[in-house]
Image: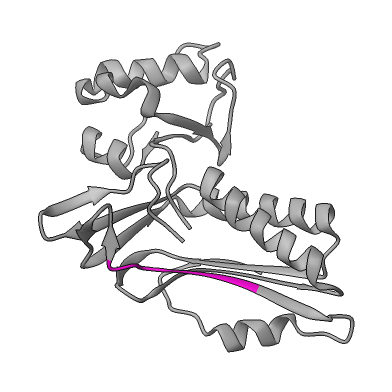
Amino acid sequence: MIRVTKDDFSVDEELRRLNAPSVGGMVTFIGVVRAESEGQRVDSMEIEVYPEMAEKQLETIRGEALRKFGVEEILIVHRFGNLMVGDDIVLIAVSAGHRDSAFDACRYVIDELKKRVPIWKRERTPTGVRWVEVGRPDED
Amino acid sequence: MRYFASIRELTDIKEEQIEVPEGTTADALKHRVQSLHERLRPQEGNILVAVNGSFVEPSRVLIQGDEVALFPPVSGG
């Protein structure tokens, strides 16, 4: 239920993996590459990852969210490599019996991912390449 | 040692082996690396340390075979 990959993902296919008779709803968050950042055009993005640690951290966050919110299942896919504007970066999908816990768990996972999973974005802009700095309101 | 993102660019290498005396802490190793790679010296507050894939306290004592990684604050998602 955790994947750090160069490959694109199909949201439909991933959601089918989560459906089960006990599930009453599913919530997803999908992060995509935006064409603008800090007033500058973004042409593309490179994402670097420390794969072994990223998978470990994501598994930890997933476990925390499963326990904390009592949801059925949580799936996390994060891409790395070269991505173009409009490409999917990350998918968080949560299935649960009821919607409140699914929304809460999804929000928790993306917020924690941004704080402690070793993944770094670098934007290509018309004036050069720059690392995305933490605390900059770049994303979502 | 493994280096990632802007820290990897400043060291110009992805990984290296460093021998340290017994009892060396994660924080002491970070400072050792900063003395070996002078472009890391101004980065003090911008370097995170992980050991074997987990964030650690600066006082964590290293043991033979630990994989230590240095990298900047994360920006995924």
Look at 27% across and 52% down and name the residue there.
A38
Q: In which quarter of the image is the N terminus of chain A?
A: bottom right
Which residues, given as a range, are shown in magenta?
A28-35
Look at 55% across and 41% down and name the residue there.
B53
Q: Quadrant of residue A133?
A: top left
* Residue B9 in magenta stretch: no
Position in image of residue B76 (x %, y %): 45, 54
Q: Nearer the viewer, residue B26 or A70?
A: A70
Q: Main secondary structure of the magenta part?
A: strand
Label total for image? 0
Can residue A59 be seen here? no
Look at 20% across and 25% down and name the residue there.
B39
- In the image, A121: left or right of B62? left
Q: Is residue B36 above or below residue A57?
A: above
Q: Residue furthest left?
A: A127
Look at 68% across and 73% down and name the residue there.
A27
Q: Nearer the viewer, residue B25 or B39?
A: B39
Q: Is residue B28 above or below residue B7?
A: above
Position in image of residue B58 (x %, y %): 54, 19
Can residue A48 be seen here? yes
Position in image of residue B55 (x %, y %): 57, 34
- In the image, A11: left or right of A63? left
- In the image, A72: left or right of B27? right
Q: Is residue A73 above or below residue A109?
A: below
